[in-house]
Image (cartoon, rainbow, N blue to C red):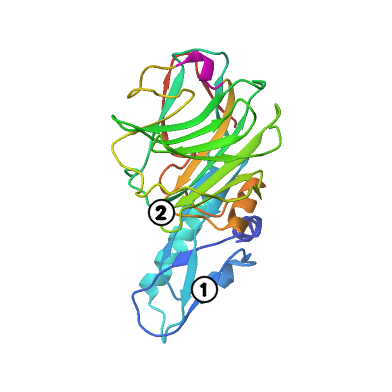
């Protein structure tokens, strides 16, 4: 029991527990620490948990809504305890994963397989990367293209600005400090309803832009890093390729709040990326790309 309590003390739990029983009002717990295993016995709910790696540490991620009920069913309690204890006792998820693009080429890229089609009316895209490519070299950071058009591209432009391009025509430019050769995190959020587009560099936001796309992202494309596809997985230009290391790519189908993005920039986990989750996404490497996995 002491081992379990120690494990619980190490994790900040944010979770959702749903019970089909009636009665009681929900209590949302966020960024709270459970200080003893006995605290679990007061939870009158059914649990869903998810574990994945975010940054250097693995973490336990969930969301908890607690419904107070008149009585506690032993079956529900057993399910709660078994799932929670199993999650805590699982060995740590494999360490930090990264992709190294060692040289400029027109053939090296990595395809990421999303968990769902990219038919999105809103999104949050976050990347963590490092590159030693100097200005005025233009660099592709992320590319999503269908057979007929670029749907979502993120660039570092030749003048140092970061650019989000939707549908080949709508472009938002963001003036940011020069990235430099060390690791940086870039997040960009967009939603169709308001057209508001905001870019965050290492947790700090640039001035929001208005990107009037008129429609959401279209499904049926391919997501790649390392190259800009001017055709469907083809016509790569070595002079625009990514050279450096990519530490994370995460994509959500919604706009994350600014405080959540600030937490992400410090390496904290708080939310499972439901479209592309770096800890679990399938990576298909092409050319001279090396994948590393820290223990």
Nearer the observer, 70 or 123:
123
Label 2, on which residue?
192
**Image quadrant where residue 222 sits:** top left
| Highlighted range, magenta | 237-242
Name the residue: 56% across, 25% down: 139
Name the residue: 41% across, 80% down: 72
Q: Check if mark 2's residue and mark 1's residue have beta carbons within 8 Å.
A: no
Name the residue: 53% across, 70% down: 40
SS for tag 1? helix
Residue 264, percent from left and from top: 61, 49
Q: Quadrant of the N terminus?
A: bottom right
**Residue 94 visible in the current orientation:** no
Disc 2 crowd rating (10 Å Cα; few below 14, some 14-19, many 20+) is some
Residue 132, percent from left and from top: 67, 21
Mark 2 or mark 1: which comes first in sequence?
Answer: 1
225 vs 247, left or right, is left
**Residue 41 got which mark?**
1
Nearer the observer, 165 or 41:
165
Nearer the observer, 10 or 127:
127
SS for tag 2? loop
Q: Is residue 129 magenta?
A: no
Image position of 156 with respect to 195: above or below? above
């Amino acid at each position: 029991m002491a081992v379990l309590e120690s494990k619980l003390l190490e994790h900040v739990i944010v979770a959702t527990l749903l019970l089909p029983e009636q009665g009681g009002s929900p209590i949302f717990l966020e960024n709270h620490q459970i200080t003893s295993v006995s605290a679990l016995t007061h939870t009158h709910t059914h649990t869903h948990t998810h574990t994945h790696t975010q940054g250097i540490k693995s973490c336990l991620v969930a969301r908890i809504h607690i419904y107070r009920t008149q009585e506690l069913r032993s079956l529900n309690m057993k399910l709660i305890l078994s799932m929670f204890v199993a999650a805590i006792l699982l060995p740590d998820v494999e360490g930090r994963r990264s992709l190294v693009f060692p040289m400029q080429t027109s053939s090296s890229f990595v395809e990421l397989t999303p968990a769902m089609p990219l038919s999105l009316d809103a999104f949050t895209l976050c990347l963590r990367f490092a590159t030693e490519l100097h200005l005025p070299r233009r660099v592709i950071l992320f590319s999503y293209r269908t057979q007929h058009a670029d749907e979502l591209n993120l660039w570092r432009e030749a003048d140092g600005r970061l650019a989000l391009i939707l549908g080949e025509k709508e472009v938002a430019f963001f003036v940011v400090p020069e990235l430099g050769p060390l690791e940086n995190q870039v997040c960009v959020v967009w939603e169709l309803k308001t057209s508001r587009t905001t870019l965050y560099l290492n947790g700090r936001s640039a001035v929001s832009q208005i990107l009037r796309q008129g429609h959401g992202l279209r499904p049926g494309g391919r997501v790649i890093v390392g190259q800009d596809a001017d055709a469907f997985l083809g016509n790569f230009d070595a002079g625009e390729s990514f050279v450096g290391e990519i530490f994370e790519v995460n994509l959500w189908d919604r706009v994350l709040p600014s405080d959540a993005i600030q937490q992400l920039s410090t390496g904290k986990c708080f939310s499972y990326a439901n479209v592309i989750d770096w800890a679990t996404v399938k990576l298909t490497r092409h050319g001279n790309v090396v994948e590393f996995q820290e223990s």
